[in-house]
Image: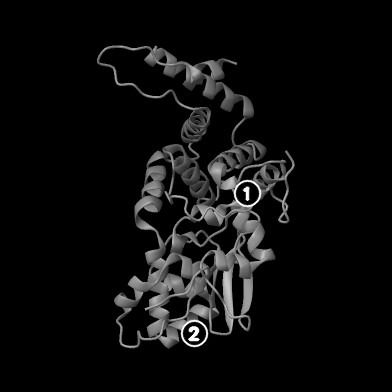
C-alpha cells in the first residue's frame, strides 16, 4: 500500500534541511478529516485551535475547586448546587458545558461517592478538564464497580467498614462531580484558601481532603 | 495468551496506571481529533450520542480482544476511529474521499521531503 511506504520512508539527508519524522498513519488520517471538513464548510480551523488551547491551558480542576469552595462557604449556593448542579455551575459564569447535565453529590462521614465511567470515559470536562490516564484505564473502569473498597485502598483511601460506598457511573448525558467533605480546622479559611486545598481526585471521589 | 484474571481482563491490565504522566494530549493530532468531535457536536453538525455510541463500541471491542492492552494507551486512536465512523455513517464524508486524501497527503510529504 502506498500509504505504508510513504509513512515508513526515511527522509533523505539534505544539508541545512530540518529533519522531521514522516507523519504517522494517525496523523495523516487526522489531517485528512480536518482538511475535508474545513473544505466542506463543516468546521472552522480557528475554532479547532481555540478548543485545543482551552483544554490545554484554561480548563482544569481549579474550576471545580471554585465551585466546591463556594458551596462550603455559602449554604444557599450549596443547596442550589445539590439540587441542580448544571444551573448552579452556570451561575458562576463557567462555560464549556456541552449540553450535558452535571449532578453534584455530597460526600459525608457516612456516605462516600466515587465516580467512574464504565463504558468509555465520560467526565465533567467543564469543571475538571480532561480526565487523568487512570480514569480512562480498563483497570479502573472494570474494577471500581466490582470492588470499590479495594480500589480506593490502592489510591490510599481507607474507609471504615461503616461507611457506605456508592459508585456512580457517568454517561454522555449525566456527568458527576463530587462535593468532598470540608476538612476540620478550616473554619476561618477564605474561599480562595479553601479552593487551593481542593484536589481533582477528591472531586472524583478517590481521595479525601486534609487541611 | 489468554491470561484472564478475575476482572475479565488480563492480569497486567488489572493494574491501575496511577503514576502515568498526565498530559492533556500526548501528540498534537490527539488534540485535533478531540477538538473536531467536540466542536461538531456543539454546533450540532453531529450528535454527541452518535459519536459516543461508536466510541463505546470501539473501546468495548478493543477490550474484548484476548491479551488486550489497557485502552488508555490508545485512547485517542479509539476516538479517531469512532469519529471517522460517525462522519461516514452519517454521510458527512465518504470513505473513498478520506482514503484518497490520506494518499494525497502522504504523497505531498514525499514530494516535499524527498
* Residue A23 % position (x, y): 45, 26
Indicate the position of residue A144 as horizontal and vertical percent values: 63, 63
Tag in front: 2 or 1: 1
| Colouring style | one colour
Mark 1 element type: helix
Which of the image's four quarters has the C terminus of chain B? top left
Q: Is residue A51 above or below residue A10?
A: below
Mark 2 surroundings within 10 Å by alpha-carbon count, few (fewer than 14), some (14 through 19), many (20 or more): few
Residue beneath label 2, please? A79
Q: Is residue A55 above or below residue A148?
A: above
- Residue drawn at x 62%, y 57% is A141
Answer few, some or many: residues within 10 Å of disc 1's Cα (few below 14, many 20 plus, some between 14 and 19).
many
Residue A52's place in the image compared with B101, above or below, is below
Q: Which mark is residue A59?
A: none
Horizontal arrangement in the rendering, residue B13 relative to residue B21 (left or right): right
**Considering the numbered disc 2 on the image, is that residue within a helix, a strand or a loop?**
helix
Residue A15: quadrant of the picture: top left
The residue under the point 39% across, 58% down is A59
Pick whichever, B21 or B38, lies toward us: B21
The answer to which of A105 and A199 lies nearer the viewer is A199
Q: Which residue is tagged 1?
A: B13
Q: Is residue A148 above or below residue A29?
A: below
**Residue A92 in view:** no
Asked if the residue under mark 1 is in contact with the one under mark 2, i.e. CB atoms within 8 Å, the reply is no
Q: Are marks 2 and 1 on the same chain?
A: no
- The residues bearing labels 2 and 1 have C-alpha atoms spaced at a distance of 40 Å
Using the rendered image of the protein, determine whether residue B91 is visible from the camera's viewpoint: yes
Query: In the image, residue A203 lies at what x, y percent?
Result: 48, 69
In this rendered view, identify the residue nearer to me: B67 or A165: B67
Q: Chain letter for mark 1, please.
A: B
Amino acid at each position: 500500500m502506498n500509504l505504508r511506504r510513504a509513512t515508513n520512508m526515511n527522509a533523505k539527508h539534505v544539508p541545512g534541511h530540518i529533519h522531521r519524522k514522516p507523519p504517522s498513519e494517525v496523523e495523516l488520517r487526522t489531517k485528512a478529516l480536518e482538511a475535508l471538513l474545513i473544505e466542506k464548510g463543516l468546521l472552522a480551523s480557528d475554532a479547532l485551535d481555540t478548543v485545543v488551547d482551552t483544554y490545554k491551558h484554561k480548563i482544569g480542576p481549579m474550576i471545580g475547586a471554585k465551585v466546591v469552595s463556594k458551596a462550603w462557604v455559602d449554604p444557599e449556593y450549596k443547596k442550589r448546587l445539590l439540587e441542580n448542579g448544571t444551573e448552579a455551575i452556570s451561575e458562576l459564569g463557567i462555560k464549556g458545558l456541552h449540553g450535558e447535565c452535571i449532578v453534584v453529590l455530597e460526600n459525608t462521614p457516612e456516605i462516600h461517592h466515587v465516580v467512574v465511567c464504565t463504558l468509555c470515559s465520560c467526565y465533567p470536562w467543564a469543571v475538571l478538564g480532561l480526565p487523568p490516564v487512570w480514569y480512562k484505564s480498563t483497570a479502573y473502569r472494570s474494577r471500581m464497580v466490582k470492588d470499590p473498597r479495594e480500589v480506593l485502598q490502592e489510591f490510599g483511601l481507607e474507609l471504615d467498614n461503616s461507611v457506605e460506598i456508592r459508585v456512580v457511573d457517568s454517561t454522555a448525558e449525566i456527568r458527576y462531580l463530587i462535593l468532598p467533605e470540608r476538612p476540620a480546622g478550616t473554619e476561618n479559611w477564605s474561599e480562595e484558601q479553601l479552593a487551593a486545598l481542593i484536589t481533582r481526585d477528591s472531586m472524583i471521589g478517590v481521595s479525601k481532603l486534609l487541611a | 495468551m489468554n491470561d484472564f484474571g478475575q476482572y475479565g481482563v488480563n492480569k497486567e491490565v488489572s493494574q491501575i496506571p496511577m503514576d502515568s504522566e498526565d498530559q492533556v494530549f500526548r501528540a498534537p493530532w490527539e488534540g485535533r481529533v478531540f477538538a473536531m468531535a467536540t466542536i461538531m457536536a456543539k454546533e450540532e453538525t453531529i450528535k454527541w450520542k452518535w459519536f459516543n455510541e461508536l466510541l463505546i463500541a470501539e473501546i468495548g471491542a478493543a477490550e474484548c480482544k484476548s491479551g488486550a492492552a489497557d485502552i488508555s494507551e490508545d485512547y485517542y486512536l479509539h476516538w479517531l476511529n469512532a469519529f471517522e465512523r460517525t462522519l461516514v455513517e452519517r454521510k458527512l464524508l465518504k470513505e473513498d474521499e478520506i482514503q484518497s486524501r490520506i494518499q494525497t497527503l502522504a504523497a505531498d510529504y514525499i514530494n516535499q521531503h524527498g
